[in-house]
Image (cartoon, rainbow, N blue to C red):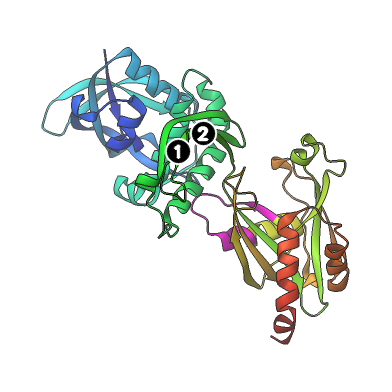
Amino acid sequence: MVDLFVYGTLRHMPLLELVLGRSGAALDVTPAHLPDHGAFAVVDQPFPAIEARVGHRAPGLLLRGLTPDDMAALNFYEGGFDYTLRPVTVALDAGGSAPAEVYFPEPGLWQTGAAWDLGDWQQKWGALSLRAAEEVMAYRGRLTAAEVAERFRPIRIRAAAWLAAQNRPGDPDHDLTRDVVVHQHKRAYLNFFAMEEMDLQFRRYDGSLSPVINRGVALVGQAAVVLPYDRRRDAVLLIEQFRAATYIAGNQRPWMWEPVAGLIDPGETPEQAARREAMEEAGLTIDQLETVAQVYPSSGASGEFLHIFVGLCDFDEIAGGGGLESEGEDIRSQILPYEALIQGVDDQTYQDMPLVTAALWLSRHRERLRQG
């Protein structure tokens, strides 16, 4: 049995229960703190790191009597981020002290900032962390902790997309609690994208439930798509890059002309992502965003959700672009007169659906934008 002191996100009992796979009511939990240490926010991350600092105290919980399986689950959840268990003596809030172990990060691993606050984290990141932990823990025994850690960013992107989908308006004609019956949910594959399968039934139009069917979905996240448009030039900017997905699918033209696009990071709005991607991929500062559509591009196979924009900008102020080498991007751009863009749509030159969607929207609103 192990006595463990937790100071960070695992103080959130729903998360601790999810990771352990059992109710917190059965745990021996005691409020405690670690003297001369503090929990500090990690820069650009939604979790804290503990550091030795004289005069500080790191609040937390002492979890007594954790089983080997408990520790295996915790080591899987924490282990991919270069945390190491170390023995300490914690002070009990009710008085006295007790030996325990603590997950300490490797020295210099994280850059820390201000003191971390559990309540602020719960409000901003609690729900997302629970959803991400569901996906993480589904791969215990199938992937190593390090392999999951390598995929943690896309896991969080998918979690944020799921929460955003949950917050969109429901269907007034269907009650999902009775009109969809899930018999089995399997997380089949985890990488930059994920594949999930369900055996389920749905309510048919005659009122009966369908037979049990097996269906899968490719989960990506949410993406922002922006077609840059210079009103003065009456021209758009397109980017071209190699798309492995279309190559794997057998396409003989895997270098695709597209609008600027990229996944929306957790905590980022679609508009912020559109502006960020425009600078990263095309070196453009967007002056104004016009909303085109919010859509699933392939609702029969993919859960990706697109926020499509036309971005008003000045092509005389292009600075940089080309994508991020860290993300394997190799991008070139082309400025194209509006009439050439529409001719390409009519000639079925373009294979990228968001590009065609944005171009057709622009054809309807171009005069208004130019007058504005």
Crowd rating for badge 1 (residues with CA inside 10 Å; few <14, some 14–19, many 20+): some
Numbered disc 1: secondary structure = strand
The image shows residue 43 at horizontal and vertical percentages of 48, 45
In which quadrant of the rendered image does the C terminus lie?
bottom right
Numbered disc 2: secondary structure = strand
- The answer to whether any part of residue 28 appears in the image is no
The residue stretch that appears in magenta: 261-274
> Residue 269: within the magenta?
yes
In which quadrant of the rendered image does the N terminus lie?
top left
The image shows residue 29 at horizontal and vertical percentages of 19, 28
**In the image, 310: left or right of 184?**
right
Of the residues shown, which amino acid type is indicated by label 2? Ile
Q: Looking at the rendered structure, which numbered label has been put on residue 91?
A: none
- In the image, what residue occupies the spot 68% across and 62% down? 226
Position of 78 relative to 360 (above/below): above
- In the image, what residue occupies the spot 17% across and 24% down? 97
The residue wearing badge 2 is 213
Marks 1 and 2: in contact by CB < 8 Å?
yes
- The answer to whether any part of residue 293 appears in the image is yes
**Residue with the most extreme bottom position:** 371
**In the image, 63: left or right of 190?**
left
The image shows residue 134 at horizontal and vertical percentages of 42, 34
**Residue with the most extreme front position:** 206
The residue wearing badge 1 is 201
Of the residues shown, which amino acid type is indicated by label 1? Gln
Position of 167 relative to 327 (above/below): below
Determine the image quadrant of residue 47: top left
Q: Nearer the viewer, residue 127 or 169?
A: 169
